[in-house]
Amino acid sequence: MSEQEDRIVLLDEEGREYEFYVVDVIEVDGYEYAILLPTEEEVTGEAEVLRIDRDDEGKEILVQIDDEEEWERVAQAWEDYVDELYEMDELDEEDEEH
């Protein structure tokens, strides 16, 4: 995947454009969620998590998560995934040392 394909541009309510890196897409409870990081450091620097849905024409759209319980499930799934990756990386480093 090229660097350009790893990026997405989103518009806010005033029509301002913000570019994000697509870090990953995870599945939770049958829905897919895009994990996004802003490309510009002056923006908050925190990850944005948006649900991937389809519009009336069947095109993929990104939807803000308004339900707090859904947000908590997705945040926990992402945290677990990152922890698992970190643990796997540590195990790989230990194997290389031996």
Image (tube, grey):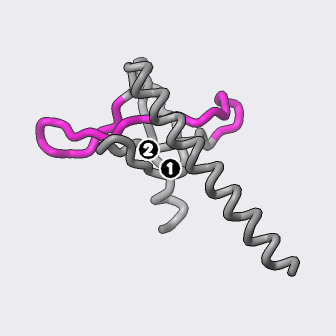
Residue 66, by quadrant, is top left
> Which one is in front, 78 or 21?
78
Q: Which residues are magenta?
A: 40-63
Q: Which residue is mark 2?
A: 34
Residue at far right of view:
97
Q: Going by the image, does 59 lie left or right of 37? A: left
Instruction: Kindly identify the amino acid type of the residue bearing the numbered disc 1.
Output: Val
Q: Residue at x 52, y 34 (%)?
A: 75
Indicate the position of residue 20 as horizontal and vertical percent values.
Answer: 53, 43
Q: Which residue is mark 1?
A: 22
> Which one is in front, 6 or 78?
78
Whether the magenta-drawn stretch holds residue 6 is answered as no
What is the crowding at mark 1: few (fewer than 14 residues within 10 Å), some, or many (at least 20)?
A: many
Indicate the position of residue 65 as horizontal and vertical percent values.
Answer: 39, 26
Q: Going by the image, does 80 lie left or right of 71? A: right
Q: Residue at x 38, y 20 (%)?
A: 67
Q: Going by the image, does 95 lie left or right of 64? A: right
Asked whether the beta carbons under mark 1 and mark 2 sit within 8 Å of each other, the answer is yes
> Which one is in front, 51 or 14?
51
Q: Earlier in the sequence, mark 1 or mark 2?
A: 1
Where disc 2 sits, the SS reads strand
- Count of number-bearing discs: 2
Whether the magenta-drawn stretch holds residue 54 is answered as yes
Q: Residue at x 38, y 43 (%)?
A: 28
Where disc 1 sits, the SS reads strand
What is the crowding at mark 2: few (fewer than 14 residues within 10 Å), some, or many (at least 20)?
A: some
Quadrant assignment for the C terminus:
bottom right
Between marks 1 and 2, how big is the CA–CA gap? 7 Å
Indicate the position of residue 22 as horizontal and vertical percent values.
Answer: 50, 49
Q: Nearer the viewer, mark 1 or mark 2?
A: 2
